[in-house]
Image (cartoon, rainbow, N blue to C red):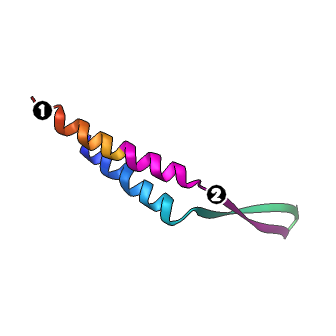
Amino acid sequence: MKLAGIILIVLGVLALVYQTFNYTVHKQDAKLGPVEISHDETHSVWVPPVIGGVLIVAGVGAIAASGRSKI
């Protein structure tokens, strides 16, 4: 449970620092024998800062819950 909390906190901090991430898709348009026509499309995805905050709070909650579960 502590490991999951740490991972959530790290993901939350990354979401706050890098609010967008990009990925590239290679698309093949046509193939005529040995001739290929293709292009790369770059897409950007915006991550709202609220998501980062929720991940951090969930991570802290998971760490706190794992500490209380030992009786």
Say if the magenta span includes residue 64: no
- State which quarter of the image contains the N terminus: top left
Residue 2: percent from left, percent from top: 25, 45
Question: Residue drawn 31% across and 40% down?
Answer: 61
Q: Position of residue 46 (x, y in %)?
A: 64, 57
**Which quadrant: the C terminus?**
top left
Instruction: Give the magenta range.
Output: 34-58
- Left or right of 49? Residue 11 is left
The residue singled out by tag 2 in the image is 46
Q: Residue at x 38, y 46 (%)?
A: 57
Badge 1 local density, few (<14 within 10 Å), some, or many (20+)?
A: few
Q: Nearer the viewer, residue 49 or 69?
A: 49
The answer to whether residue 36 is left or right of residue 5 is: right
Is 41 on the left or on the right of 55, as rendered? right
Q: Which residue is mark 1?
A: 70
Identified by mark 2, the residue type is Trp
Displayed quadrant of residue 20: bottom right
User: Foreground: 34 or 36?
Assistant: 36
